[in-house]
Amino acid sequence: MKNLSPKTITLLALVALVLVAPLFFPSSFYYRVGTLMFINGLAVTGLVILIGYAGQISLGHAGFCGIGAYACALAPVHLGLPPVVAMLLGALISGVLAYLVGRPILRLKGHYLAVATLGFGILIFMVLSNESWLTGGPDGMQVEDLGLRDLLKSLGLSVPAAQVWYWFSGLVLLLGALLALNLHTSSTGRALRALHDSEIAARTVGVDVAYFKLMAFVISAVYASVSGSLLAMMNKFVTPDIAGFLHSVQMVTMTVLGGAGSVFGAITGASILTALPQALTVFHDYEHIVLGLIMMLVMIFLREGLVPSLIKRFSRRQG
Amino acid sequence: MKLLEIEGLGIDFGGVKAVDAVSFAVTEGEIVSVIGPNGAGKTTLFNMISGVYLPARGSVRLAGETVTGLPPQALAARGLSRTFQNLQVFQQMSVLDNVMAGFHLSEGRHILSDILALPSSLRRNRETEDAARKLLARVGLERGAELIASQLSYGALKRLEIARALACKPRLLLLDEPAAGCNAVETEEIDHLIAAVAKEGVAILLVEHDMKLVMKISDHIVVLDHGVKITEGKPEVVARDPKVIEAYLGAHGGKEAANALG
Ligand SMILES: Nc1ncnc2c1ncn2[C@@H]1O[C@H](COP(=O)(O)OP(=O)(O)OP(=O)(O)O)[C@@H](O)[C@H]1O
Ligand SMILES: [Mg+2]
């Protein structure tokens, strides 16, 4: 264990999770839960880059999920694009929009940044809700499936749809985690983590703080967008709620619950908060309250998040 | 050649002139110290030179180019680097990462190849790590490389900041009280380190309250009091200047001044 890098350990743990989890699924319904975990885990991995590495907050990232989702809903119908290409188009639009919006917004700090991103998310939500001629309004609209299952069928493999989605989303999450971990140990990652700890010192060593914050915002927006696309295609349906405030708060809560600074921690947070509502219907009815409660408890007792706090406690006992 | 020339530099805080009409120059490879009682405006002067504060009056020239009001990252690119009196270490990063972050400019921007961990990115990382470990050895921190910075002692953090500043390959290094909070042995080490860095041709602008250190290593001393320069000259001259002794006696540093200067 000693000579494996944290990056390798995280990736191995994720691969193990994806491979082993199905052995414990009591019914095929759980493939769907697993898929949801992975899709949320992907968005949260993006937020690790923004919140955990760069130390910037966003309460509007669901807006980018919405863009990714509606790109997959609209582009195949109106532009005749295949769903995968629609997903990439959504990611491109999200990235460009994040670049344009991020420039003025990221000059703000703390609460002001939180409120400004909140406003951005609400704006996207409103557009998706109000432009019913295009988006079907609050009732939502149909989304074409990714078509992976048909592809496998044509190759002579018949895999249930839920399983196809499970393995595919698991793979995308692994890829997302890999890229985020690559970033962590690179020059760019160091610049992001440096400006998180001391903007003034980061500038003193030559970091263009505004530029690197913007890049973290853009990258995390692309993650959120792909996550939204996958969610919409899996459900074959999307409503504006995907861009709603609650979804933004869910994502941030997942990130800080597991530990914003660590990819594995944040994915754990995403898994817990995805599985909980499925297991406890009570949770579903009081989702807002429980989310708020978790957020408060984490902030009071586990400032660094679940996984880093546990690791610290464990290693202290050993040492 | 004059590396740093400041002319009539001044700034006000709430109508009070924190620094006013300060002029002096630093030649290549020279160690210049700025001394003065607490609140004299030494850190404020550093903040203006390094682009942290925008001066209200005056100009700063670096290697002949006027750089007044340029942001710190632009000055870093022109060879100006600094440490902070109130430590500005990257607390959550490892000691090694702190110094590696100092190589930001020489590494350049390669976001895509960093995300994809392309061979070029990995190679850059290895080179930076080697260079960073060398710098850590130079400041005596090589054994703590993998620690999180917040686990280091105060004196070690001071040296970590110096290593990070050296990673920027400065032509001019601003050190704001590098020996503060250090014991006699650590102060001695810092003394040697500064002298060695200067010998390599890096000009050093030093703020330090340890008068023994200042008198020993400075080529030239600038004395500030209440935001203005009261005198400037060779250490032995400044030490005997009645204006300097009065500034120190008039302020809180009476005993310190008597001990060190007298
Ligand atoms: N950002 C600021 N806002 C308002 N006043 C400031 C600010 N920075 C410094 N000052 C004031 O400017 C004066 C000079 O402070 P400065 O920190 O430059 O002194 P110094 O010579 O570095 O002192 P020390 O030896 O204690 O470090 C002080 O009166 C201080 O209170
Ligand atoms: Mg000071």
Image (cartoon, rainbow, N blue to C red):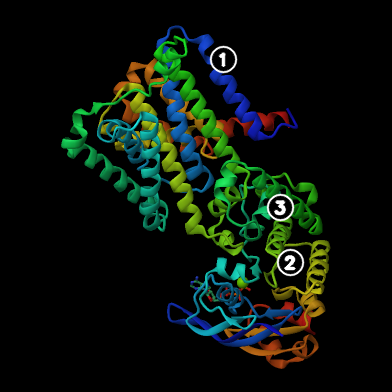
Q: Is residue B155 visible?
A: yes
| Among the two numbered marks 2 and 3 on one chain, the one whose residue lies closer to the N terminus | 3
> How many other residues sit within 10 Å of disc 3, few (<14), some (14-19) or many (≥20)?
many
> How many other residues sit within 10 Å of disc 2, few (<14), some (14-19) or many (≥20)?
many
**Label 2 in the same subunit as label 1:** no
Q: Secondary structure at mark 2?
A: loop
Q: Chain of mark 1?
A: A
Q: Which residue is mark 1?
A: A20
Residue at 17% x, 36% y: name it: A132
Indicate which quadrant contains ligand 2: bottom right
As displayed, is residue B41 above or below residue A266?
below
Residue at 56% x, 69% y: name it: B74
Report the amino acid beneath label 1: Val
> How many other residues sit within 10 Å of disc 1, few (<14), some (14-19) or many (≥20)?
few
**Label 3 in the same subunit as label 1:** no
Give residue B211's position: percent from left, percent from top. Answer: 76, 77
Give residue A124's position: percent from left, percent from top. Answer: 27, 42
As displayed, is residue A87 above or below residue B25?
above
Q: Is mark 1 within 8 Å of ligand 1?
A: no
Identify the residue at the far left of this view.
Answer: A133
Q: Secondary structure at mark 1?
A: helix
What is the spatial separation of the Cα atoms under label 2 and label 3, in whole angstroms? Answer: 27 Å
Q: Which residue is mark 2?
A: B179
As displayed, is residue A176 above or below residue B191?
above
Q: Is residue A250 visible?
A: no
Q: Nearer the viewer, mark 2 or mark 3?
A: 3
Q: Which residue is mark 3?
A: B128
What is the spatial separation of the Cα atoms under label 3 and label 1, in whole angstroms? Answer: 39 Å
Viewer-nearest residue: A155 or B174: A155
